[in-house]
Image (cartoon, rainbow, N blue to C red):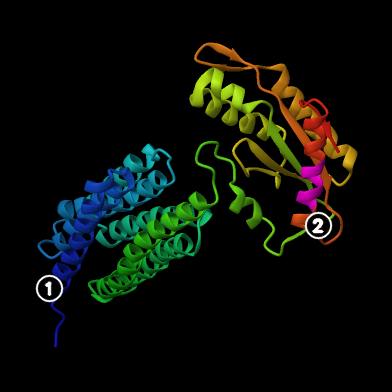
Amino acid sequence: MSIDYATIHLCNALLNLSYAGMLLALWYRRREPHLMLWAVSLLVVSVAVYGFTFTRNPIVVAVLLTAISVNISLVWAGARAFDGRPPYHWNLVVCPAVTLTGYLYLSYLGTRSGAAALATALLAINVAMAGLYLLRGDGGFARKATGWVLLAYAPVYVVSIFLDLAYDDSQLSSVLILVSDFVLNNAFVVGLFAMMEERARIALKQLAITDQLTGALNRAGLLGKFPDGKVSAARTLLLADLDHFKIINDTFGHSGGDTALKAFVSRAKEFLNKGEFIARIGGEEFGIVLAATSLQDAADRAEQIRQELANAPVIWNGQSMPVTASFGVAVGERSESFEAVMTRADDALYRAKRGGRNQVVA
């Protein structure tokens, strides 16, 4: 019994075309560049895969191998677009060009097996680099799994090289690549969809804990930082309230008030270190969690934020809008509840407002 390679190649090509169609349908709705790049990569590889069934002419084979190199480069470009980055233009040009010229040159010298080995080695390097890019990037399990799938192509290509060199005119290499591609390509495309679903899920989660106006955490996001309800002794809570916010709204309108809120958050973030964060917990009230361990250190940090806000008026529609804030400071005791720290910081904030506002009370 012989293997019907033409039918297998056709099935593989049709499968890639169906995946490309799904990505194109998504691109039509979302207009996201990574979807188009991935769709085109699958269209290119589907043509290349089926093209191998028609001829072994060295020029045509060189073009088909170059198309597979283009496919890998487009996959990598799509991954970078997924991350909001431009593609490596050298990869889109250099890798396919070297594959084409290298294969044609060695074929001209009469070493067809050497030409195939060179082209396959270049494909292995290209796909390994694309896989490593996915593995190094930020993401969850789906992204890592997709990166490992791409990396798995590299050893398949390497083994196929040895089979071609050791068993000239054997079909072992073709069988290996056909079987591997059926498994890996399906896993890869599933990985792409899983990556997009994973990012959408993370975005929804982030949306649920983020204040949409200022970009700070919301109250739920702040509480989520303390899942056990306890504040360690290495944490300090600042409560800040913008002074006379109603007057700001009445004078400059709600647009001016929104600008004041966003300005406060952006300026406060300039004084935050890694692991520290700010949350909007009320209309014009904010909670800032610092890593300061002493009351004086925390009060000094709050004073820096207060001075930055008070000394540089917010500009809104060409107008100077004075904005100040009052601060209450409380340092967490060992295993103290978040509510207890919040109550003490709120008491300090009340004293700051009662004492004339635009000040820090610890």
Residue 67 visible at all: no
Is the residue 250 above or below the residue 44 in the image? above
Q: Which residue is mark 1?
A: 7
Q: What amino acid type is highlighted by mark number 2?
A: Ser
Is residue 344 found inside the magenta-colored segment of the image?
yes
Secondary structure, mark 2, is loop
Relative horizontal placement of residue 75, taking residue 259 as reference (left or right): left
Nearer-the-camera pick, 110 or 21 = 21
Which residue is at 24% across, 75% downward?
A: 170
Report the amino acid beneath label 1. Thr
Q: 29 left or right of 326?
A: left
Residue 165 position in % (x across, y down): 33, 68
Q: Earlier in the sequence, mark 2 or mark 1?
A: 1
Residue 20's x, y, as percent?
A: 22, 57
Q: Residue at x 32, y 48 (%)?
A: 74
Mark drawn on residue 342: none
Q: Mark 2 highlights which residue?
A: 232
Q: Residues within 10 Å of mark 1 (few under 14, many from 20)?
A: few
Magenta region: 341-347
Residue 329 part of the magenta-drawn span: no
C-beta proximity under 8 Å, tags 2 and 1? no
